[in-house]
Image (spheres, coloured by chain):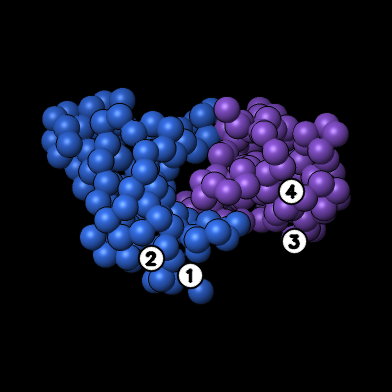
Amino acid sequence: DVKVTQSSRYLVKRTGEKVFLECVQDMDHENMFWYRQDPGLGLRLIYFSYDVKMKEKGDIPEGYSVSREKKERFSLILESASTNQTSMYLCASGIQGAEELFFGEGSRLTVL
Amino acid sequence: GDSVTQMEGPVTLSEEAFLTINCTYTATGYPSLFWYVQYPGEGLQLLLKATKADDKGSNKGFEATYRKETTSFHLEKGSVQVSDSAVYFCALKARGYNKLIFGAGTRLAVHP
């Protein structure tokens, strides 16, 4: 089975802190994605990557950056967390050109 | 831009009732369409998909038909169970693109 693992299920951080969310997939997928999930808004794409060291902005990249140094790992970075970044963050991976995405269980971030 | 609109929830049903969750989309060209499901405490998983007009996707008793003329992909199930309680997301993927665009999600609660 494909497994997408997110490092932290729950995090509580303070405004201004730097936050790292890690995601690892074990199926050698080329594509990896970071979404945030908010009630009434569904999932919105923050960034995605189609290869190592490659990244593209999604629909809401402001306040975020990403890193993909190895194929299996895709990190989301909040340089200076703000309260409006309190959300559920979902990582996903998929084969290049394929239809299906595989999701992790999510990381619920609270910024105080 | 491309978008997906779902009926607002929550949808509350008794066990064995008929379920319909409406989904309409706006897209240029002919996207692929998906339903993903998120059970409590879990990540999203693909429920079913359809890649061209008049295709019917089906899985676990759920069905959805790709209707190009009405730009719709409504999810149906003839007899829901308590275990179907979850959040359901409609999504599209435009041809030639890697990313999925999601609707806001519809929460389904099934009571015994």
- Mark 3 Cα shell of 10 Å, populated few (<14), some (14-19), many (≥20): few
Q: CA distance from mark 1 to mark 3?
A: 20 Å
Write down the residue under mark 4: B112
Nearer to us: label 2 or label 4: 2
Badge 3: chain ID: B
| Rendered residue at 82%/53% (across/down) | B56
User: Closest to the observer: A67 or A96?
Assistant: A96
Q: Which quarter of the figure has residue A13?
A: top left
Percent x, y for residue A60? 38, 31
Left or right: A104 as drawn, with respect to B35: left
> N-terminal of the two: label 2 or label 1?
1
Q: Secondary structure at mark 2?
A: strand
Element type at marker 3?
loop
Q: Quadrant of residue A64?
A: top left
The amino acid beneath tag 4 is Pro
Q: Describe the element under mark 4 as helix, strand or loop.
A: loop
Q: Type of residue at label 3?
A: Lys
Q: Which residue is mark 3?
A: B60
For label 1, the residue is: A2
Tag 2 residue:
A25
